[in-house]
Image: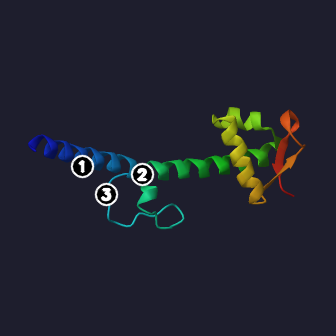
Amino acid sequence: MLYQSLIIFIGIVVGFVVATVIYGGFKYKDVRDSEGEKISFFRRGIVGRQIQKKKQNLDKVLELLEEKGEMSNSDIHKILGVSKRTVVNYMDILEKENKVEQVGNTGRSVLYQLKK
């Protein structure tokens, strides 16, 4: 009985530590991002940092396209240091937001440029 109680207690402690690391701690004050929007409890930890990095990378892609005019997936992959699949996902997001357009159909001939 004592052994089982100890195992349960250790499980609770480990769960608490993992939750604290993943969600950035248990902070009860309002946290706001650079635009003044309230950041949810979930977005404060690792997930929040991933969301922030993704937004920074999308902004960087737009800046690069503004500077260079056209870029391929490989160019963006090399500059950002993310996987090629991540670049494809980023470009899909920017296409859906009508910020960029694809020039070419498929493969290595595909380039992206800012939407006119």
Taking the spot 49% from the left edge, 49% from the top edge, the residue there is: 49
Mark 3–mark 1 Cα distance, whole angstroms, equals: 15 Å
Instruction: Give the foreground label among 1 and 2.
Output: 1
Q: Which dot marks residue 86? A: none
Q: In terms of sequence position, does the residue under pointer 3 or pointer 2 come before the other? A: 3
Furthest residue in direction right, as rendered: 104
Could you say where residue 55 lies in the image, as x and y percent from the top left? 60, 52
15 on left or right of 87: left
22 on left or right of 64: left
Q: Quadrant of residue 67?
A: top right
Q: In terms of sequence position, does the residue under pointer 1 or pointer 2 come before the other? A: 1
Q: Relative to 87, does residue 99 appear above or below in the rendering?
A: below
Report if the CB atoms under discs 3 and 1 are less than 8 Å apart: no
Q: Which residue is mark 3?
A: 26
Q: Which residue is mark 2?
A: 45
44 on left or right of 53: left
Instruction: Give the foreground label among 3 and 1.
Output: 1
Question: What is the secondary structure assignment of the residue under circle 1?
Answer: helix
Taking the spot 69% from the left edge, 47% from the top edge, the residue there is: 90
Could you say where residue 88 lies in the image, as x and y percent from the top left? 72, 43
Q: Which residue is mark 1?
A: 12
Could you say where residue 106 lies in the image, as x and y percent from the top left? 86, 40
Along the line of sight, the residue nearer the viewer: 62 or 43: 43
Residue type at tag 2: Gly
Along the line of sight, the residue nearer the viewer: 13 or 68: 13
**Label 3 crowd bin: few (<14), some (14–19), many (20+), radius 10 Å:** few
32 on left or right of 96: left
Residue type at tag 1: Ile
Residue type at tag 3: Phe
Mark 3–mark 2 Cα distance, whole angstroms, equals: 10 Å
